[in-house]
Image (cartoon, rainbow, N blue to C red):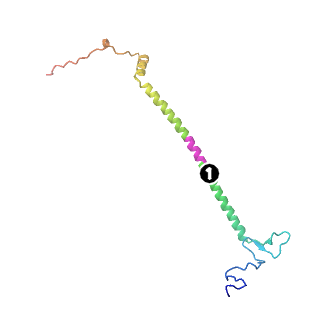
Amino acid sequence: MTPFSPTPTRSPRAPNRTKQVVGMSWAHGWTRTATPTAGEAQGFRRGPTRGGTSLLLGLVVIAVSVAAIVRVRASARVLGLGAEITELTDGQSRLQEHKRRLLAERAYLRHPDQIGDVARSKFGMVAAVPDLVQAIRLVDAPPAE
């Protein structure tokens, strides 16, 4: 053939698109009819289904359901752990506030003025004045013979 031939050439691998396929069945169960009837749309009709299609569809539904259940359980677990973290954080802040109050109370009770007040009121102690102080002198013991 010459490059300027009037008839178009087709590649040997190119499909013939002008030929209609009638009676051919696909994996999804639909077949092509020659002429569409009133109930059929665009010349397709539902053919007999194979047993493997419904089994495959059932397995897909089960797999999706299991994945959804796992996802929901994981989300519920995350929410539960978040609530637990919030509760523990609140407990920690309460304990830190209690510790702060106890440290302040300890500092108040250890102050010398507070100790003096408690000694005078509770134990009846008085401040030491020089007149009340007695000096103790150690006397050397005589040498033992």
**Image check: 7 left or right of 85?**
right
Disc 1 is placed on an element classified as helix
Q: Position of residue 29 (x, y in %)?
A: 75, 71
| Residue at the disc numbered 1 | 75
| Predominant SS of the magenta segment | helix
Compared to residue 44, the image places residue 19 above or below, namely below
**Image check: 105 left or right of 28?**
left
Q: Residue furthest left?
A: 145
Q: Position of residue 76 (x, y in %)?
A: 62, 50
Q: Kindly identify the residue that appears in the image at 51 percent across and 36 percent down.
A: 95
| Viewer-side residue, 6 vs 18 | 6
Kindly indicate the quadrant of the structure image that contains residue 68. Answer: bottom right
**Image check: 48 left or right of 126?**
right
Report crowding for label 1: few under 14, some 14 to 19, many 20 or more residues within 10 A (C-alpha).
few
Is residue 82 rendered magenta in the image?
A: yes
| Viewer-side residue, 16 vs 142 | 16
Q: Residue furthest right?
A: 38
| Viewer-side residue, 30 vs 57 | 30
Range shown magenta: 79-88
Q: Kindly identify the residue that appears in the image at 58 percent across and 47 percent down.
A: 81
Is residue 105 rendered magenta in the image?
A: no
Q: Residue furthest top?
A: 131
Compared to residue 138, the image places residue 42 above or below, namely below
Kindly indicate the quadrant of the structure image that contains residue 38. Answer: bottom right
Q: Position of residue 133 (x, y in %)?
A: 30, 14
Kindly indicate the quadrant of the structure image that contains residue 109. Answer: top left
Q: Residue furthest front?
A: 4
Q: Quadrant of the C terminus?
A: top left
Q: Quadrant of the N terminus?
A: bottom right
Q: Amino acid at mark 1?
A: Ser
